[in-house]
Amino acid sequence: MPGVVHVIDDDASFRRAVERRLKLAGYDVRTYSSAQQLLDFLSDAEASGCILLDVQMAGLSGLELQNRLIERGSLLPIVFVTGYADTPTAVRAIKAGAEDVLIDQPGRRTRRHGARLQGRPRHHH
């Protein structure tokens, strides 16, 4: 069975839609409405799987969460999802160790930046 996918997004309808699709594909899914919720969970549990993370959220942003996880020594692969075609943000996320950045805009094909997530640990440069 595939591993756990931690989905962090402040948009409840997006979280539910992603959760449904991933569960249909056989993944164990845990959802969080904020970056802080994930940090609180990971501090009390052994981390496994990967993270699907919104770039822009209220409170702690996706990039800030990525930095906090790196500071903690987390090796969970991160894939960012955003509705904003912001290439500099995508580049920053990849340079900081994200596995991929998916830009999903209504009416347009999803664009990818970076390497394809294959469940491997991140390597810090």
Image: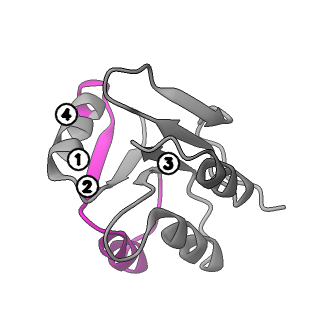
Q: Which residue is mark 3?
A: 80
Q: Amino acid at mark 1?
A: Arg
Q: Which residue is mark 1?
A: 15
Find the magenta span and give its range.
23-48
The Cα–Cα distance between marks 3 and 2, rounded to whole angstroms, is: 15 Å
Q: Residue at x 38, y 32 (%)?
A: 105
Q: Residue at x 25, y 60 (%)?
A: 10
The Cα–Cα distance between marks 2 and 1, rounded to whole angstroms, is: 7 Å
Which sits earlier in the primary sequence, circle 3 or circle 4?
4
The Cα–Cα distance between marks 4 and 1, rounded to whole angstroms, is: 9 Å
66 is higher (above) or lower (below) than 122: below
Residue 20: give its label.
4
- Residue 102, percent across and down? 50, 37
Q: How many marks?
A: 4
Q: Amino acid at mark 3?
A: Phe
97 is higher (above) or lower (below) than 115: below
The Cα–Cα distance between marks 4 and 2, rounded to whole angstroms, is: 11 Å
